[in-house]
Image (cartoon, helix red, strand yellow):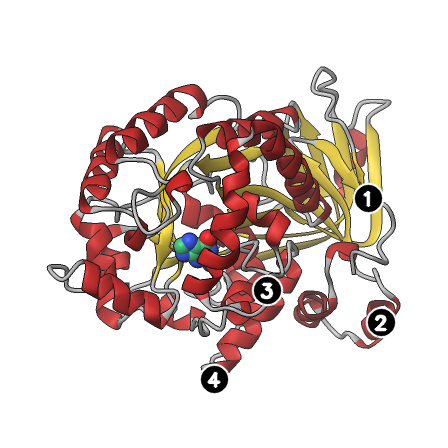
């Protein structure tokens, strides 16, 4: 994959030129949720369309033959025949500091955290190291068509500043937070309830709503926060009701048992977060593999979301989420996809869809291609509460787009000869495609990556 890919170009964003530009090609986007509605009612596919972009937004979208004559002379049109123009992918759960220790051998969650993760994260006390990793991380995301993500930093505020600063240079819509932990981790990674509150609050004031940045209140997970810290973060969340919250829930059975020991007064893992006011709309929890029906009902009732991270779940041996159960129509829980780097093994959302399909197969409830592409685009945007801005290719939306080369490898080129319809095209792409399939990534209307 990466080794054989041609050198990637991450292009500097030229925000001073807000010229009108356009992309021409087949366009796919979602207008509804294919877990809840017939697919034909929610998928929008238009052959030979034009997407016109200006000042970072989509200003027109329609048949190329109708729109081309309306364009002023000199408007640059990038033509992508045999490609698919999609909303930029949305990675709902990812740890940028773990880029440096992706693919660490052999442990399950708790041992993996202690042996690898907490060691790597200590290096982020150095902001220059943080910045170096951020650059690799964002370049990888763009190479994979990811234009928005909800990101864990480390306990160090400076490591979050580095991410927001570099994302701002690229004009990326990014959501991120300082990890809060005050127990069960190495001393060098611990804060206190008050420090967690004050540093998170200062980061909210510095970054939340600045350009395309949003702050995310980020307790790592229940076992690494004391009752006092969860209380302080609940108070912070109450002060900022529109701010996102992210954490982990019910990923691994040993973790679930540990949480039951640590919080005996709470009925279950979900009720720990609920008790501290951390279960609400725009709260997104990674994994949720082992949630009971009752806990899923609590997620639904609260408006909180889950991020499905299948490459991570297979890698750590955590289990297989039943995505269709999570999205069940009687009590749908909002669901997005996450790479969960560095427990996750790929920055590619196509590969993440691939593994989500396989996780669902274990439950005898396979995901359709439409459901998988929905989760990676509009579903993720709904789960993060940003669907009014990104996740769809529609007039008024921010112009974050991924262009998929449908024949990116010799095998895909061959396999595509036998594809009969859109559904099969999408399925083949999510099974066989990876970073090589991303021909271009547009951020706020500008080319940010071209293969
Ligand atoms: N649970 C708590 N922290 C982490 C983390 O960094 N990665 C994963 N996969 N699970 C976690
Ligand atoms: Zn995670």
Q: Is residue 354 left or right of residue 77?
A: left
Q: CA distance from mark 3 to mark 1?
A: 23 Å
Residue for badge 1: 8
Residue for badge 4: 364
Residue 132 in the image: state x and y as whole percent.
66, 34
Residue for badge 3: 353
Residue 259 in the image: state x and y as whole percent.
25, 62
Q: Which mark is residue 36?
A: none
Q: Counting residues from the N terminus, which is met first, the one under dot 3 or under dot 4?
A: 3
Q: Which mark is residue 411?
A: 2
User: Ligand 1: which quarter?
Assistant: bottom left
Q: CA distance from mark 4 to mark 2?
A: 28 Å
Q: Is residue 291 left or right of residue 370?
A: left
Q: CA distance from mark 1 to mark 4?
A: 38 Å
Q: Which of the pair 67/275 is nearer the observer?
A: 275
Say what secondary structure mark 3 lies in: helix
Circles 1 and 2: CB distance less than 8 Å?
A: no
């Amino acid at each position: 994959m990466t080794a054989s890919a041609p050198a990637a170009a991450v292009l500097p964003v030229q925000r001073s030129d807000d010229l009108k530009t356009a992309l021409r090609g087949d366009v796919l986007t979602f207008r509804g949720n294919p877990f809840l509605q017939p697919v034909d009612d929610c998928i929008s596919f238009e052959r030979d369309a034009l997407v016109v972009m200006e000042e970072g937004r989509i200003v027109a979208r329609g048949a190329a033959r109708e729109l081309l004559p309306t364009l002023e002379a000199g408007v640059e049109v990038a033509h992508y025949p045999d490609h698919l123009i999609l909303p930029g992918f949305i990675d709902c759960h990812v740890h940028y500091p773990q880029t440096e220790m992706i693919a660490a051998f052999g442990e399950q969650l708790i041992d993996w955290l202690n042996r690898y993760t907490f060691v790597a994260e200590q290096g982020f006390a150095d902001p220059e190291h943080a910045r170096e990793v951020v650059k690799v991380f964002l370049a990888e995301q763009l190479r994979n068509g990811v234009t928005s993500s909800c990101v864990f930093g480390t306990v160090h505020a400076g490591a979050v500043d580095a991410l927001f600063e570099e994302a701002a240079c690229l004009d990326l819509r990014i959501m991120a937070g300082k990890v809060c932990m005050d127990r069960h981790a190495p001393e060098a990674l611990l804060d206190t309830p008050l420090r967690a509150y004050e540093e998170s609050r200062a980061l909210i004031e510095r970054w939340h709503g600045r350009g395309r940045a949003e702050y995310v209140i980020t307790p790592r997970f229940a076992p690494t926060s004391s009752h006092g810290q969860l209380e302080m973060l609940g108070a912070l969340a109450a002060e900022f009701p529109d701010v996102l919250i992210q954490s982990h829930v019910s990923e691994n059975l040993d973790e679930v048992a540990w949480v039951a020991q640590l919080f005996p007064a709470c009925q279950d893992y979900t009720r720990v977060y609920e008790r501290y006011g951390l279960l609400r709309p725009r709260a997104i929890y990674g994994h949720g593999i082992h949630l009971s029906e009752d806990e899923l009902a609590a997620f639904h009732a609260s408006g909180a979301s889950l991020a499905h991270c299948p490459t991570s779940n297979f890698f750590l041996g955590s289990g297989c989420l039943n995505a269709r159960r999570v999205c069940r129509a009687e009590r749908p829980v909002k669901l997005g996809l996450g790479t969960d780097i560095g427990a996750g093994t790929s920055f590619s959302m196509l590969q993440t869809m691939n593994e989500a399909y396989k996780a669902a197969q274990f439950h005898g409830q396979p995901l359709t291609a439409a459901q998988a592409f929905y989760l990676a685009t509009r579903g993720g945007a709904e789960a993060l509460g940003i669907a009014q801005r990104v996740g769809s290719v529609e007039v008024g939306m921010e112009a974050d787009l991924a262009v998929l080369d449908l024949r990116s490898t010799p095998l895909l080129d061959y396999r595509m000869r036998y594809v009969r319809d859109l559904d099969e095209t999408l399925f083949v792409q999510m099974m066989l495609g990876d970073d090589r399939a991303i021909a271009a990534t547009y951020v706020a209307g500008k080319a940010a990556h071209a293969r």
